[in-house]
Image (cartoon, grey):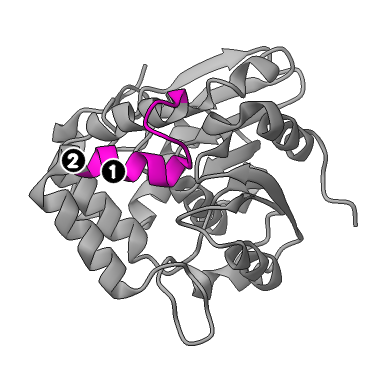
Amino acid sequence: MGVVEEAHNVKVIGSGNQGTIVLGHGFGTDQSVWKHLVPHLVEDYRLVLYDNMGAGTTNPEYFDFDRYSTLEGFSFDLIAILEDLQIESCIFVGHSLSGMVGVLASLNRPDFFSKIVMISASPRYVNDADYQGGFEEEDLNQLFEAMRSNYKAWCLGFAPLAVGGDLDSVAVQEFSRTLFNMRPDIALSLAQTIFHSDMRQILPFVSVPCHIVQSVKDLAVPVAVSEYLHNNLGSESVVEVMSSDGHLPQLSSPDSVIPVLLRHIRNDIAL
């Protein structure tokens, strides 16, 4: 295993008869967030799972605060993983942060991606004059201050809000666990990078077909964001707003969400 693969805990499983799928997770999770989806794909596809740098499962000594002060650092990592594995084309499924990371990577190497399925993704989280991102700057300042002052308490409070469940739910406990596994200073830096990112200007240059999937109720991503993506992406795109609640629907509502994801993975956009 190469340095890149080892650093990102890359796992390759499945038969690959119907092509390669690469699964990228969002902030506060790791590749375990895909545990309900993977069993439905391993017989037909070659699956690549990896952890974004900064996840609690990665070595914090490898985290470069300058490199990951923008989303480009994550997109370069994704391209490096695909190059190391000699993947010529894949379906990229990106949750939250990784939805935009996939879009960024596709600008540099569109040949690597046959399509992108993005779940709970947003090009910008802060409201603007003609844009509803879901947060005001003051909301984010309070969030960052809470992370600084008592990270464990913040995790316990943020997890049920993000997942959309009570503290006793399995999904909330799972998200709390992976959040708390992150080193607090790295988690704060990543949160600032993600919540202050603005990818709106690059959307018209995207050429890879995009499937946009999200919950009808999501603390971090209003439904208006999916419509914005659909209307501004340069490529063919399709939107599906699911009846699920929360920012991690593949973890919290697998019975209803996994069939939707499988449909978007297996079927291309009808033109």
Residue 155 sits above or below residue 11 on the image: below
- Looking at the rendered structure, the kind of residue marked 1 is Gly
**Span colored in magenta:** 154-170
- The kind of secondary structure element at disc 1 is helix
What residue did someone put label 1 on?
157
Residue under the image location 26 percent in, 29 percent down = 56
Asked if labels 1 and 2 touch by Cβ distance under 8 angstroms, the answer is yes
Residue 65 sits above or below residue 26 on the image: below
Q: Could you tell me residue 177's position as x and y percent?
A: 30, 26
What residue did someone put label 2 on?
153
Task: Please say whether residue 165 is one of the residues in the magenta stretch.
Answer: yes
With 168 as the anchor, is 48 left or right in this view?
Answer: right
Residue under the image location 50 percent in, 57 percent down = 104
With 100 as the anchor, is 271 left or right in this view?
Answer: right
Asked whether residue 70 is in view, the answer is: no
Asked whether residue 188 is in view, the answer is: yes
Q: Could you tell me residue 262's position as x and y percent?
A: 74, 31
With 162 as the anchor, is 65 left or right in this view?
Answer: left
Quadrant of the rendered image containing residue 140: bottom left
Task: Please say whether residue 234 is one of the residues in the magenta stretch.
Answer: no
- The outermost residue toward the left is 149
Q: Could you tell me residue 247's position as x and y percent?
A: 50, 46
